[in-house]
Image (cartoon, rainbow, N blue to C red):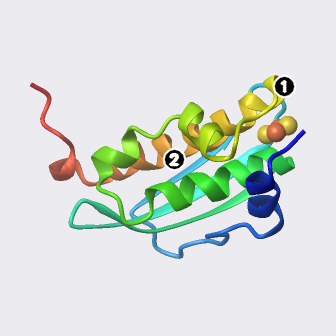
């Protein structure tokens, strides 16, 4: 049902934890199952300098959170913003249809944390053309 990559990220999740003074933070729960993810980001020079999370959810949610944070760590904000649940699922070797919402949780939490960063640092937000 799950790829070896997904099982590895579930059993050895990367970037788990909290950041005491994050530049951006979000807590999101899945409307599908009620599982929860908290994500913290530090931003330096418009790049994701650090990212940590805590996921209270299923194996696919934990693996999705781990993979999503690996994919954005060290990336410019505008690249991190473009991360989608489909890209996370693809990097994990695919997800069963019933588990697609688990990768949505990770991507949604990440986007919400970036929006929180922009709300707190409006000078960093991309100018609306
Ligand atoms: Fe809730 Fe996977 S079943 S996030």
Tell me the quarter of the picture where residue 89 sits.
top right
The label on residue 74 is none
Report the residue marked by disc 2.
110
* CA neighbours of label 2 inside 10 A, class few (<14), some (14 to 19), many (20+): many
User: Above or below — where is 60 with respect to 31?
Assistant: below
Most foreground residue, 21 or 41: 41
Q: Residue furthest right?
A: 1
Which secondary structure, mark 2?
Answer: helix
- Toward the viewer: 76 or 128? 76
The quadrant holding residue 76 is bottom left
Image quarter where the C terminus lies is top left
The residue lying toward the viewer, choosing from 98 and 43, is 98
Q: Nearer the viewer, residue 16 or 118?
A: 16
Whole-percent x, y for residue 115 in the image = 39, 42
Left or right, 106 with respect to 97, comes to left
Q: Residues within 10 Å of mark 1 (few under 14, many from 20)?
A: few
Q: Can you say whether 79 is above or below 53 in the image? A: above
Query: Which quarter of the picture shows residue 85?
Result: top right
Quadrant showing the N terminus: top right
Residue hosting label 1: 98
Residue 103 at x, y = what percent?
67, 38
Whole-percent x, y for residue 71 in the image? 49, 55
Residue most extreme to the left: 129
Q: CA distance from mark 1 to mark 2?
A: 21 Å
Is the CB of mark 1 within 8 Å of ligand 1?
no
Q: Residue at x 78, y 63 (%)?
A: 8
Q: Quadrant of ligand 1?
A: top right
Q: Position of 50 compared to 45: left or right?
A: right
Q: Is mark 2 within 8 Å of ligand 1?
A: no
């Amino acid at each position: 049902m799950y790829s070896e990559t997904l099982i590895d990220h579930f059993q050895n999740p990367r970037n788990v934890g909290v950041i005491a003074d994050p530049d951006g933070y979000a807590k999101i729960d899945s409307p599908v199952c009620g599982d929860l993810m908290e994500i913290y980001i530090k931003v330096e020079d418009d790049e994701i300098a650090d990212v940590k999370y805590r996921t209270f959810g299923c194996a696919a949610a934990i693996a999705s959170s781990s993979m999503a944070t690996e994919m954005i760590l060290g990336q410019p904000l505008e690249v991190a913003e473009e991360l989608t649940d489909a890209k996370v699922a693809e990097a994990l070797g695919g997800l069963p249809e019933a588990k697609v919402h688990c990768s949505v949780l990770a991507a949604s939490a990440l986007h919400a944390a970036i929006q929180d960063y922009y709300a707190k640092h409006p000078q960093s937000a991309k100018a609306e053309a």
